[in-house]
Amino acid sequence: MSYRIPSPPPSLEELAKRQQNVITASQLRARGVPARVVTGHCRRGGPWQRLLPRVYLLQSGEPTPEQRMWAALLYAAQNGREEGRREGAVITGTAALALYGFAAVPRLPAVTGVDVLVPRQRRLKDAGEVRIRRTERELVASSVHGLACAPVARAVADALGEWTAEGVAPEFGEGAAPVVRAVLREAVERPDIRCTVRELVAELTESGLAADLRVRAALDELLATERDAVLERLGVLVDEWLLPAPLAGPELRMRGGTYVAVPDLYWPRAGVAVEVDSELRCVSEGEAAWVRGGQHRMEYLGIRVVYLSGARLAAEPEAVGAELREAFRQGGTDVVELLVTER
């Protein structure tokens, strides 16, 4: 049987280097530094300074932007924990986006406030430039330059919540709408971030921001761009598999004029429709119910509906092509005669 010998906790020098000279009172106490020594070192002209309640900078002079972030995180972290990621606190909002390197937000030195997300039951107050934000959901952290940050989608939602509430963030010299569009676009287009449109939609809906007209307009624009790109790839795949050209986005009605649906693609003679990322066509539950209703009506009327996702189309184009060809070969079942209007 092998035994694992626990490694000793890092020394004060090692911990200070890891946390860019920012240390909590509990971390100092655990390393044998008496409170009176800390108080003496933090007097005017001393070598240390107090940045936030129970958070100290082991140097004189102005703290760097990164040290400000460390101070905010350590202030909000449960018991000032030192090992691994910071449990119980993550940086979010504009500060997190600046750490991620978003070009659409000010650089880190210009960020004047730090939003830190903590569990709802934590008893903490705002302090200095640190704003405490509470959540009932489990915290998820991404390490950015050694700091625990909220995932991109959550950070975007928290930043947008502040900007739209104020009309514009203080760091920006223009209205919020252009900034909202730029941030959403950058979140999904940067390959190093890997934030999906679905994640953004989920966070913005959860936070209630999807109802804001400025956010909704930017989100609709983003969703339309995403779906257009997927439909373009699907059109190329249809050509590669030698299928007849389908109608794009036709309106289907019954002979009496009753509305049925607007599928993404439709082969009238075969009675086959294709729905691509249908959840990305709708943000509110009312819109989702409307889309689902159309899909159910098509199936009830005998149309064979093929449901595809952009992710699967990108990962398994051959399988998707074979599925479309088989669906076209089988066709619909006793399809009711419909009025088809090209849009």
Image (tube, rainbow, N blue to C red):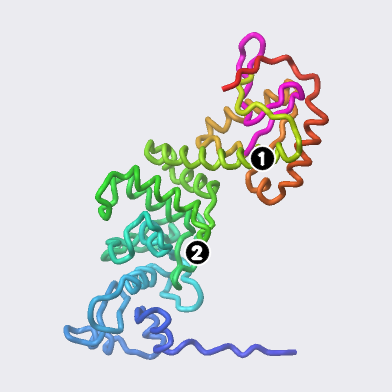
Query: Quarter-wise, where is residue 5 in the image?
Result: bottom right
Residue 25 visible (yes or no):
no
Q: Is residue 258 above or below residue 246?
A: above
Which one is in front, 5 or 103? 103
Residue annotated with mark 2: 141
Q: Label 1: few (<14), some or many (≥20) within 10 Å?
A: few
- Which quarter of the rendered picture does the N terminus lie within? bottom right
Q: Position of residue 137 (x, y in %)?
A: 50, 55
Q: Position of residue 288 (x, y in %)?
A: 56, 33
Residues in magenta, as a range? 253-276
Q: CA distance from mark 2 to mark 1?
A: 39 Å
For the residue labelled by badge 1, is the local secondary structure a helix, a strand or a loop? Answer: helix
Query: Quarter-wise, where is residue 130 in the image?
Result: bottom left
For the residue labelled by badge 2, is the local secondary structure a helix, a strand or a loop? Answer: loop
Q: Is residue 265 above or below residue 341?
A: below
What amino acid is at disc 1?
A: Val
Q: Nearer the viewer, mark 2 or mark 1?
A: 1
